[in-house]
Image (cartoon, coloured by chain):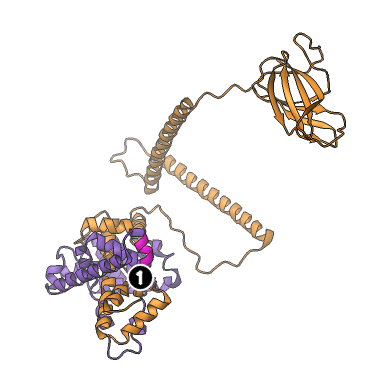
Amino acid sequence: MISNCDDVRGMFPWLLNGTLSDDERREVLQHLATCATCRHDLADTRLAAEIFDQHPPAEAILALAWDETPPGVDPALLEEHLASCPRCAAELELARMSRRLEEDDRIVPLTRRTAPAAPATGWRGWKSAALAAGLAGVVASAGWFQTAGRVGTLEKQLAEKPAVAAPAPAPPAAGSHNEQLAAELQEKMKKIDQKEKELSAQLDQLAEARPAAPTPQMISRTLNLMPSGDVARGGESAETPEIPARSSAVLLLQANPPDTNLDRAVEIVNASGKVAWSATGLPFDAENHIYALALPAGLSAGTYTIRIYRIAADGRREPVESYAIRVK
Amino acid sequence: MATDDQEIVSRFLRGEADAVGTVDGWISRAAWPYQRRLANRWDDVLQDIRLEITRLLGQGKFRGESSLRTYLWRVTNHSCLDQIRADSKRQWTDLEEIEKGTAGPPPHPTAAIHEDRDLLWRVLERSSQDCRELWRMILAGHSYRDMSLRLGVAEGTLRVRALRCREKALAARAELLATPATNRRNAEAPATPNQVEEANG
């Protein structure tokens, strides 16, 4: 609730930036309608806002762009301002770009299209673009060949001049320009080579820092197992399916048609009768009468019996099927 | 002044096509980075620059301290920056709207606010960093509730701080206004290429 002049004055900055709520704004305006002192104060606040909304003079921006000391401006304040004012930072960048255009005539600014192009539709637009690109390529190639031809001609002309002629004539402007470009290109290529070497070295360092990749040994397999009896130490048959240790395998356990929908539990028991792994809620494919079991990791070499149990309502486990496997 | 530059100036002022073309090419190239920002009135901007350059060269403002090309480049950049700044001038809640229905004229004529930018910049230089930061947030359109949360100060404290900063800034302005303008401005740093020439002239 705004009750006095001090409250109203405190609101002025936000009245000017338009962020007061409707109620606050209405109260402030009502007060202003009757208080000349506050109206004067509001004008002062607006003047202060103008002061704090100042930006460095354009000549300071231009001086920075031309790597000169900004005239008559506190450099620290200017730096602080540029760091926090995207508008001025953008102006500086535009001026720097203009300076680059002054210094390097090889930069060709692209003329902006003044009228919007007619919207191309469907494949015709694509076709036009492709044709334009092709044409541009032909023109560029022709230009390149012409330039190359001119360079060749100039070189030939230079070579034909007598070597002892004195004084030596100045090289043609085009030739020197091309030489300059070639030198710059060579320099750039050197830099690229250097960067590539640095990158390669960094990649090598990265590779060394990484832990060695494990030897590829993952063999994913699916085994279709028929029910069998329990296996005992030394009693496994030659037909017992073999699974390499530390391999990934999915066992499809063929089952008899279930008589009930009771839950199934599974145990993997080693040849000594010790349970190596167990679980409940074994998925059952009722259509194909198959249990799908992902072979648990960590089974050491040996023979095992996979036992399927039916879990009765009172929690008792009734054996249903068993399957023999051998882990190598 | 280099003879070539003087010759270009003379021929440009006589309206010879090649000199006009040369200067026009420089203007277009120098102004090119600003084209996107001023696209809606680009032709007018270029025309204004041409007129300004014609005026400067016609009045003999270019005295050859730099090359003609560099001189025109700076004039063009200066003009473009001025145009951009004029476009992005902040639109404040209008005092006239607020004062609508109140008796008597506004205490400060609006024109007085748009005073010497150099003076206002000097005042800003004298302000503390805290004040500049506080008002920068206000100018960025933050509500006082938002600012209170961000700065971790009570809303009432925030309002008092803003008012104190305002008072300090206005006091600094009054102090600078009492100082002769020639003492305020760095005489070694005239503002624009025009002023460079005028100062020398």
Image coordinates of residue A309 in percent, x first then y, are 78, 27
Image coordinates of residue A208 in percent, x first then y, are 47, 25
Q: Which residues are magenta?
A: B143-149
Residue A97 lies left or right of residue B184; in this view the side is right
Residue A107 lies left or right of residue A139; in this view the side is left
A231 or A71, nearer to the observer: A231
Is residue B6 a member of the stretch shown in magenta?
Answer: no
Q: Which quadrant of the view contains residue B45?
A: bottom left
Farthest residue in the front direction?
A: A314
A325 or A178, nearer to the observer: A325
Q: Which chain is purple?
A: B
Residue at mark 1: B83
B11 or A47, nearer to the observer: A47
Dominant SS type (magenta): helix
Query: Looking at numbered disc 1 in the image, what kind of residue is underneath it?
Result: Gln
User: Which quadrant, please, contains the C terminus of chain A?
Assistant: top right
Q: Which chain is orange?
A: A
Position of residue A126 relative to residue B52, above or below, is above
